Amino acid sequence: MVITAASTVEMVQSRFPQAIVEVVEFRDEQTIVLQPESLVEVCAYLKKELEYNFLETVTAVDWPERLPRFDVVYHLLSLPHRCYLRLKVRVGQRREEHPAVPSVIDIWPGANWYEREVFDLFGITFTHHPDLRRLLMPPDWTTHPLRKDYPLSGFELPEPHWGGQVPYDVDPGVGDYYQQTLRTSEGRGLNESRVQLNPSQEPGTFSPTTERDTTNSSPSVNGQTSRADKRKG
């Protein structure tokens, strides 16, 4: 039997009519919007029966004015049949901080890091994920940078962070030409004193009781004098 994306949609509609929210065809691409609770069952059918054996990616889209707020998007490829399918589930009710979607790791193990990335950047959790923790942001980060209510200029962090990014511990090999990349245009230079803090900095990353050195000496990284200070000495 020849399987195409269009015939896949028909078979899923016939097999799981209660799971379908919407079917969209655009520029010869097929998208099935599913009920979240039916996601795993439909994915298992696609993998086992229709040979969608490659999960290209898992991502998300934030629609802050819509309910449900988020689309979680799965791009599937059947290598034997050379056809492509997109699945979506919609989650995120009003004031729901961390909406949940079932994990598909048991079907496609490659979903592991994709789901961690979506959790990290959008705050969507994946139930039954074996190791759901941040992938790109620091472990103590408390917000999710790809949500559309995240500040465009980011957050300003205390030392040893400059402009919202963590500096390298060692010189990466470009010598005097190396400069710390700043996350925002308002970010301070690498060796500038930081006696002033941004009042809107990322919550949970700095204790206001921490004592700060108000002298004119340059800040240190991990307790070591900066290379600029060594050159001055």
Image (cartoon, rainbow, N blue to C red):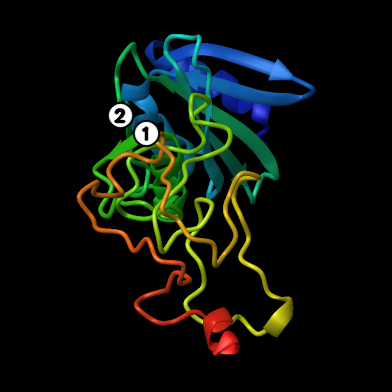
In the rendered image of this protein, does residue 45 appear above or below residue 31?
A: below
Q: Looking at this rendering, what residue extends furthest in the front direction? A: 215
- The local crowd at label 1, few if under 14, some if 14 to 19, many if 20 or more residues have their Cα within 10 Å, is many
Please name the amino acid that badge 2 sits on: His
Give the labeled residue for mark 1. 124
In the rendered image of this protein, does residue 72 appear above or below residue 201?
A: above
Give the labeled residue for mark 2. 98
Q: Is residue 39 left or right of residue 218?
A: left
Please name the amino acid that badge 1 sits on: Ile
Residue that appears at 37% across and 33% down: 124
Q: Which of 224 and 100 is in front in this view?
A: 224
Across and down, in percent, residue 70 comes to 46, 22
- The local crowd at label 2, few if under 14, some if 14 to 19, many if 20 or more residues have their Cα within 10 Å, is some
Alpha-carbon span between mark 2 and mark 1: 5 Å
Residue that appears at 41% across and 53% down: 195
The quadrant where residue 217 appears: bottom left
The quadrant where residue 135 appears: bottom left
